[in-house]
Amino acid sequence: MPSESPTPSLPKRFYTLAGVETRPDGFALVLDGRGARTPGRRPLVLPTQVLAEAVAAEWEAQEGVIDPRRMPLTRLANSAIDGVADNGEAVAAEVIRYAGSDLLCYRADHPEKLVTRQAALWDPVLAWAREELGARFILAAGVMHVTQPDAALEAVAARVERYSAPFSLAALNVMTTLTGSVLLALAVAEGHLSPAEAWAAAHVDEDFQIAAWGEDEEASARRAARWHDFAAAARLFALSRA
């Protein structure tokens, strides 16, 4: 019988001190006084001091080895620098596309408890979108696709374009893809919802099923990992604009 593939070993911590250095283009992560780099070999420079300090704290917290799973802000920063910075238009377009089939627009028609719960958590966000973004969306029952008004899609696009800076856009993209809703992502970005409130709204259906049938351990672990990433994206968004 062939042996199982060994778990990849993590790199050892090779530095004594993680810190921040002010530079003309931002705030750089430095390890023992030397500038750190992304996997793409670009300088790991953050747009604000508070974000740079939070990233440095992740590096300082590593014990013995460097575990990327315990460094969500660093991973997102690397993505912003290596990926989003050169592909901003494509990333923004991906985020905006979610407005055409946003989670909040597709409603259950039964059972009544689920219908009521969706309305309670989703209707206020749609009302906020009408008032704050000028975007009026059409609701649909079930999974049948509904074409949203051009005006609503254009309103969302205009708001997303406000956040074209790589770090803001990277965070918005993660929040959108993890929830299936650009409206929830924007509501978090603009302080209308807390990350926890948006996460709960995104999982109304799942929580209803859990209440009825119980929770699967593996599914619970996957959801916890996604929440970890979502919360980190919300934090990165806030700190990158602080």
Image (cartoon, grey):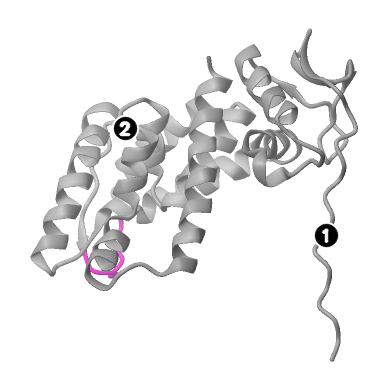
Q: In this view, does 221 lie above or below 166?
A: below
Percent from the top left, x then y, of residue 47?
A: 66, 18
Identify the residue shown where x is 32% and y is 32%.
Answer: 193
Q: Name the residue under label 2.
A: 193
Q: Is residue 183 above or below residue 206?
A: above
Q: Is mark 2 on a helix, strand or loop?
A: loop
Percent from the top left, x then y, of residue 7?
A: 80, 64
The foreground one among 195 and 90 is 195
Q: What element carries label 1?
A: loop
Q: Do the residues labelled 2 and 1 touch (CB within 8 Å)?
A: no
Whether residue 154 is visible here, answered yes or no, is no
Q: Distance between the residues labelled 2 and 1?
A: 39 Å
Whether residue 192 is visible here, answered yes or no, is yes
Q: Is residue 142 shown in magenta? A: yes
Q: Name the residue under label 1.
A: 8
Q: What stretch is highlighted in magenta?
A: 141-147
Identify the residue shown where x is 83% and y is 59%.
Answer: 8
The amino acid marked with disc number 1 is Pro
